[in-house]
Amino acid sequence: MRFEIKNASGVTHLAIEGELDAVTVSDLRPDLEKLVKAKPTLVEVDLSTLRMVDSSGVGALVSLYKRVRAQGGSVVIKGLRDQPLAIFRLLRLDRVMLNGDPRTPPPAQKSKSRH
Amino acid sequence: MQVVSAVGEAFNNIVLHGYKGRKEGSIDLRIQTRRNHIRIELRDWGSGFDPTEVPRPKFDTLPESGLGLFIMQSFMEMAYRPGRPNLLTLSKRFVERSSASRKTEGAS
């Protein structure tokens, strides 16, 4: 498992690659702790290169989601597919965590006016 | 995918709970396959548990734990016999695809 956390334009980007399970999640937890303590307003979690996740990995992501939102922030999870998506659907997390976040500001719209 | 997920949860459950607090422990893993069926037995000598006493996750509260057993039971048939050793059996029957559908897929 590899992960990367970046901050850009007020958004915290977290990308997780490989297998997030009971063994590898311990590498991620200290950085998730720091991330939450920084009180981010928006966290984008990119799971497009996550191959496998187990209940421990899901637990860490749910914890991140709940703690950031409890502080008034938002979490958007992107790119879920294959086994991780099946697990999220089984645990009914897709209904809550993948439907977008009502507090997420909409993307800036391009002006349609012509001059 | 479902078998890998269920067996991974079973293995981690033994390590994290059955052998909790121990530096090492053994897990005996046996896999039997037939044409449309897979049966996996995991034996361990750690603390046992009663699956009927493990509460079903309350999904509306976004649970962070207690999900492993639910994943196991959702993806495979599960049986558990506590003892020395504890025996956890996971099995699954696969639906065989017809030769016609295989030919169709192969041609596409």
Image (cartoon, coloured by chain):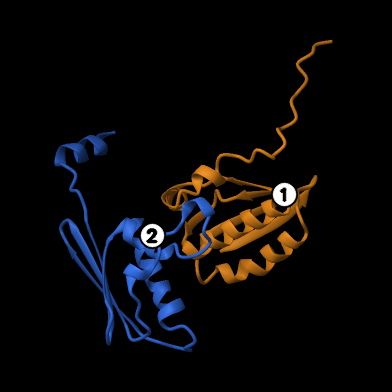
What color is chain A drawn in? Answer: orange
Is B47 above or below relative to A5?
below
Q: Residue at x 75, y 23 (%)?
A: A110
Residue A73 circle label: 1
Q: SS of the residue at dot 2?
A: helix
* Chain letter behind tag 1: A
Please identify the residue farthest to the right as the structure is shown: A115
The amino acid type of the residue labelled 1 equals Gly
Q: Is residue B5 visible?
A: no
**Count of marks, rendered view:** 2
Q: SS of the residue at dot 1?
A: loop
The image quadrant where one finds the C terminus of chain A is top right
Is B15 above or below relative to A44?
below
Q: Residue at x 46, y 77 (%)?
A: B16
**Residue B9, percent from left and from top:** 40, 67
Q: Quadrant of residue B53?
A: bottom left
Q: Which residue is mark 2?
A: B71
Q: Residue at x 53, y 54 (%)?
A: B61
**Residue A1, percent from left and from top:** 56, 64
- Is A42 on the left or on the right of A56, as rendered? right
